């Protein structure tokens, strides 16, 4: 039977479409089936199925291979599966019968069939299959082969890496690096390839400083040693990995959070140093001016409602949250937190670690928390609408809720939640206050020297700020300072950090403005005109005038 007749009978193709295809065939000499396929009249599967019927060949589909053991049959003369794939063909061997068959999407490629039968010295049974299935089988097989090869190489590589990571010079270098990091008060260690070199940097008081460069051999050994200590796969260099190291240096106990990512020249390693005993989560050490401190204490004394702390990563939000939780942590309250990760363990507080890899998300943890009768709930970060809705529900049902958002300033927190899809009335009913913060470096007290106040006040036009907040400036306190550099601060002029803030109580009038105007600019204007609200930059310059930080630091972050 002719192919056209089979296609008409099987797929209801009209005679007109067949005739049009035959006309094209006369002009071009192409195969009828290929013309019908290119014209979109039939699919590849339909064409091959019809060809199989015409030629008396079996048509193989993916499900035909399921449940029947098979493998790729490789030729001994070097003709590989990659070459056959280009010919839209593969040799399969069914393991239950040992039969070798040719799988092809081009049954008219007689020259390939003849060549293969000559090489093999036996006749091949031909199966038709879609090109996509043949390609999928070939790629899967080649990937598997590559995996076996990498596995063999990987065993040797792991042994080599373990050996160099355990050598005395490597252990000594890494120990010295950790000691130096602690002495420098570093919060992070960066070990990274850079333009053909390998450098080590410490983050101290929020800024990175280069401390060493490494030869490639030492870099590889150090990275392997770190991965070994953190329980990571030392041979895996293609995927990011995360791990932990518990460390004691002199009298300091540290938790190290290790993260590796593959980059062009190797692996970048970042180690976060969490000092178990150094941090004091005391609200008085945050850097709040007296009016801000009183307002924040007033907000946290409320029995229910939500307080949002906003700012980018590394702006000190977690420290502020932990300080508020420490303040609220009494025998009369049950406090539960949901965090990712739990950075510090707080005595007397139930802390939950989110585990997204098993589906234990912020939202799931919050639902469970509500059945545990908490008074205070802390949510590490509101990342999505679902988490926000549960947080708001918690605040509306008699819980004090503390959480964070990534926004540039405090008023923007409201508009960020609206962008997530939350209704105005829910925000107005649940939120009681918003805070924004950044961190600036503190002038070193050991080498601080006075700077003329008039010059700074005039240059940065601070007279209106001083007048608005005169109550924060006893006359003797207006004295800008700068650090000239000393051994204590490693000649940087800064030692330690302090936060700058903006915050406000979300009162009824502001709620009306929010619903009526729906404008961030209007909200900011009303806050300045009707309330003792100051921006992050203004709060920073108050600390400049008090000799706590410098104008350059304030302008760097705000």
Image: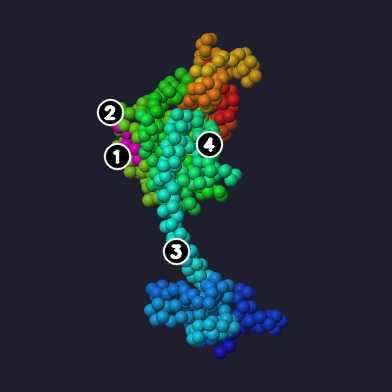
Callout 4 crowding tier (Cα within 10 Å): few <14, some 14–19, many ≥20: few
- The residue furthest left is 331
Q: Label 4, on which residue?
A: 212
Residue 394 in percent (x, y) is at: 37, 38
In the rendered view, does 512 fall on the left or right side of 256? right
**Disc assigned to residue 331:** 2
Q: Nearer the viewer, mark 4 or mark 1?
A: 4
Circle 1: element type: helix
Callout 1 crowding tier (Cα within 10 Å): few <14, some 14–19, many ≥20: few
Q: Nearer the viewer, residue 440 or 539?
A: 440
Is 349 magenta? The answer is: yes
**Disc assigned to residue 372:** 1
How far separated are the C-alphas under marks 1 and 3? 50 Å
Image quadrant in which the N terminus is located = bottom right
- What segment carries the magenta color? 348-352
Is 273 magenta? The answer is: no
**Residue in the picture at 46% in, 36% down:** 177
């Amino acid at each position: 039977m002719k192919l056209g007749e089979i296609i008409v009978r099987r797929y209801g193709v009209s005679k007109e479409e067949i005739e049009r295809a035959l006309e094209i065939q006369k002009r071009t000499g192409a195969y009828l089936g290929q013309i019908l396929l290119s014209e979109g009249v039939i699919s590849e599967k339909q064409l091959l199925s019809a060809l199989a019927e015409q030629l008396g060949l079996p048509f193989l589909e993916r499900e035909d291979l399921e449940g029947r053991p098979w493998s790729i049959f490789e030729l001994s003369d070097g003709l590989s599966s990659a070459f056959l794939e280009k010919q839209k063909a593969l040799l399969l061997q069914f393991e239950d019968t040992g039969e070798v068959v040719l799988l092809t999407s081009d049954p008219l490629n007689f020259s390939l069939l003849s060549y293969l039968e000559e090489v093999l010295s036996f006749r091949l049974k031909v199966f038709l299959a879609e090109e996509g299935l043949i390609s999928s089988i070939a790629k899967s097989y080649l990937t598997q082969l590559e995996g076996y090869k990498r596995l063999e190489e990987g065993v040797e590589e792991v042994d080599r890496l373990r050996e160099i990571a355990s050598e005395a010079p490597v252990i000594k270098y890494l120990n010295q690096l950790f000691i130096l990091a602690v002495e420098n008060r570093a919060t992070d260690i960066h070990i990274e390839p850079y333009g053909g070199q390998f450098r080590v940097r410490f983050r101290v008081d929020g800024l990175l400083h280069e401390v060493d460069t490494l030869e490639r051999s030492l870099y590889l050994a150090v990275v392997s040693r770190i991965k070994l200590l953190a329980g990571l796969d030392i041979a895996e260099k293609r995927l990011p990995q995360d791990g932990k190291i518990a460390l004691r240096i002199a009298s300091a106990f540290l938790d190290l959070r290790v993260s590796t990512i593959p980059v062009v020249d190797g692996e970048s390693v970042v180690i976060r140093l969490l000092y178990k005993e150094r941090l004091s989560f005391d609200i008085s050490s945050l850097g709040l001016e007296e009016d801000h401190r009183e307002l924040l204490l007033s907000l946290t004394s409320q029995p229910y409602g939500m307080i949002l702390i906003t700012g980018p990563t590394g702006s000190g939000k977690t420290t502020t949250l932990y300080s508020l939780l420490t303040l609220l942590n009494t025998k009369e309250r049950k406090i539960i937190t949901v965090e990712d990760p739990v950075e510090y363990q707080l005595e007397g507080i139930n802390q939950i670690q989110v585990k997204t890899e098993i589906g234990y998300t912020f939202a799931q943890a919050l639902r469970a928390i509500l059945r545990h009768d908490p008074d205070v709930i802390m949510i590490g970060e509101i990342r999505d609408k679902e988490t926000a809705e549960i947080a708001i529900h918690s605040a509306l049902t008699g819980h004090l809720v503390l959480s964070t958002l990534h926004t540039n300033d405090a008023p923007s927190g409201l508009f960020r939640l609206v962008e997530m899809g939350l209704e105005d009335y829910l925000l107005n009913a649940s939120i009681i206050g918003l805070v924004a913060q950044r961190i600036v470096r503190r002038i070193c007290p050991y080498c601080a020297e006075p700077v003329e106040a008039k010059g700074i006040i005039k240059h940065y036009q601070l007279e209106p700020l001083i007048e608005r907040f005169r109550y924060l400036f006893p006359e003797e306190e207006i004295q800008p300072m700068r650090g000239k550099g000393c051994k204590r601060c490693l000649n940087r002029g800064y030692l330690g950090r302090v936060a700058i803030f903006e915050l406000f109580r979300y009162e009824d009038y502001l709620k009306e403005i929010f619903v009526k105007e729906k404008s961030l600019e209007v909200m900011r204007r009303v806050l300045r005109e009707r309330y003792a609200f100051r921006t992050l930059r203004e709060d920073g310059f108050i600390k400049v005038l008090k000799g706590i930080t410098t104008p350059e630091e304030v302008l760097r972050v705000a």
